[in-house]
Image: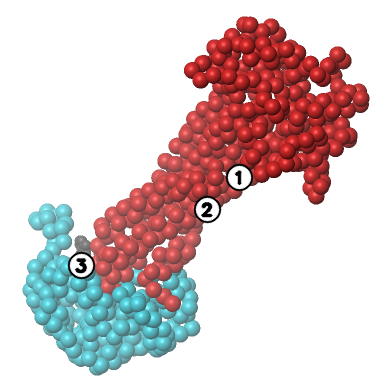
Amino acid sequence: MLSVRKLPLRNLRGYASRSAAIILFAALTSAAVFGGLLLTGAVRGGLETVRARLGADIMVTPESAKNEFDAQTALIKAEPGYFYMDSDVLEQIRSIEGVAAASPQLFLASAKAGCCSARLQLIAFDPATDFTVQPWIADTGTTREMGLMDVIIGSSVSWPSADNAVIRFYDSECSVIGQFAPTGSALDSAVYMNFDTCRALIDACRSMGLFKYADFDGDRSVSSVLVRVKEGYDAESVASEIRARIGGVSAVTAAGMLSGIADGLRHVSSAVKALMLAFWLPGLFMAVLFFAFMINERKKEFAALRAMGADRRILSRIAVTEALAANLAGGLIGIIVSGVLLCAFGGLIAGRMNVTFVLPPLGKMLLTALAALLPAVLAAACSSLAALGIISRTDAALLLKEGE
Amino acid sequence: MKLTASGIKKDFPRAGKTSNFFTAVQPLDIELSSGRLTVVSGRSGSGKSTLLNMLAGLLTPSAGSVCLDGTDIYALSDGALSRLRNASLGLIPQGNTALNSLSVLENTLLPSVLYSKCAPPYETAASLLGQLGLGSVKDEKPSALSGGELRRMSVARALLTRPGVILADEPTAGLDDENTLLVLSLLRRYADDGACVLIVTHEDEAGRFADEQLTMNGGMLSR
Ligand SMILES: Nc1ncnc2c1ncn2[C@@H]1O[C@H](COP(=O)(O)OP(=O)(O)OP(=O)(O)O)[C@@H](O)[C@H]1O
Ligand SMILES: [Mg+2]
């Protein structure tokens, strides 16, 4: 049934190519804004998640592992490695002033071969002293105590047989008892276990001739020590104290490990800002311009409506509704398309840019989407103003003549 | 119903040697009353459309007043004048004024939906279009119609709500003899049913249908 309320949509459909242009520009604008906000939010979210999950102030590793372990990229590049130092280091660290807690970890890398499910970082923690892994185990929903050959896997680790939750390393079967939430970092492809499990796997690896250290003593070795600093102490100065007092180790602070990601975040935000500006202003301009074109082209139609008794309110309502409908439709399309693309490929893009990526929760995403609609609303407002200007300047009587 | 204009005059600004405005319509009186069909003819540029638009409430006269049943229409607010125009005035403008996004039938229905939320009178519109020989194109878009068909569509649109006053600016322009007669006799019928009808035309035929014939010359109206 024909009604004045349906006129705006009928008009948009009737002038399809003009409307499509407006929708396209509105979509580009809000896609840039939403994509940009979502990307920065996700990178920042990744940084926060990793910072929380890292849980330690300082990480101590053998100095000899320099080639294998680059603290700045360790959290981003999922390149598993293993290296060892004497476990005496632990006591030495504990004796240093400002150290509140220290807990050892033992590493192994699984091989990408028949014996193993995939090439992954294996990390053993010490349940008695650990303060970085166990706080997160409760979140995985597992109630089972971690026993020998039990593992908890990072979010991106998959195991071949879903039904019996078993994962194989060096021909040894491990039971998966839990899985961590995503951090968007290398932590997602790590597998956590206790020291005994790790030593058993090292033995298996060695017996297959794949272990690279000949003089390895499982009982006297640790790969890293995670340190929590006492309140009131500066992590950086405690770290340099560790470096100074203990030979053969390197100590890096959490801030140092995260600095790579933080730099990446800064790059991403400035690129995103530039991109948003580059799309927003021209997009706004073009959307308004095309709308003004369309209204100008239809001056005579508005005059006709006026001649049959439409007052200014009806004409303005038609123009404003058309502007809103076209721009909001474009805005929504842009948001949906960029949202889907980012959800699908965001992790990949972030990986290329050496930053972590964790999508914000749905509620926050919706808020961001709402914010990304603001440019569309602004475009609608400007378009309406332009249209009202054109309509109020057209004298109905002039337009009702032949030839104009 | 009665439409009375007294002393209306229209000046247009114009860059000239002697004066900087141009009088398109000299002060004149005209009265349209129920059941009468008035024909105004005259040369191109003589001020016919200007007069008609002033009577239609679309062009404010430089002087004088236009009253519909005693109400000075130019004293009304935009909203009130618009509603009055919608309720009582059927205007057939000189130009093509179709809405391109709507079908011919929907264009014809437009005056009935501006302020009413009731279902538009599809039957009435279809029958009017049928009487004007447009039954077969009623679902087409205006862009598919010929000039003469568009003309007849705006006749149907102006008559749809059976307005008390019908103002037709060259309703038969571009029509063949047969269709000219069709339109003129339809307008005559509406006058006989009680409408005040004013037709601006070059068509000699129109005289046969008129109760009164006026001529416009250089902005002046004469009998
Ligand atoms: N808006 C305007 N500004 C200036 N001059 C105008 C305007 N509208 C009309 N005129 C002038 O007023 C005169 C009368 O114009 P009008 O349109 O009333 O003529 P008309 O009798 O309807 O002619 P036609 O038969 O060609 O339609 C013309 O000389 C025209 O140039
Ligand atoms: Mg004219």
- Among the two numbered marks 1 and 2 on one chain, the one whose residue lies closer to the N terminus: 2
Cα gap from disc 2 to disc 3, whole angstroms: 39 Å
Q: How crowded is mark 3: few (under 14 residues within 10 Å), some or many (20 or more)?
A: some
Name the residue carrying label 2.
A333
Q: How crowded is mark 1: few (under 14 residues within 10 Å), some or many (20 or more)?
A: some
Amino acid at circle 1 = Cys
Q: Give the percent coordinates (x, y) of residue B17.
A: 12, 54
* Left or right: B90 in relation to A255: left
Q: Which of marks 1 and 2 is in front?
A: 1
Please report contact status of discs 1 and 2: CB closer than 8 Å, yes or no: no
Q: In the figure, B86 relative to A250: above or below?
A: below
Residue A215 quadrant: top right
Residue B163 quadrant: bottom left
Mark on residue A382? none
Q: Residues within 10 Å of mark 2 (few under 14, many from 20)?
A: some
Q: Give the percent coordinates (x, y) of residue B63.
A: 9, 68
Cα gap from disc 1 to disc 2, whole angstroms: 15 Å
Q: Do labels 1 and 2 share a chain?
A: yes
Q: The red chain is which one?
A: A
Q: Can residue A353 be seen in this view?
A: no
Name the residue carrying label 1.
A343
Name the residue carrying label 3.
B78
Query: Which chain is indicated by disc 2?
Result: A
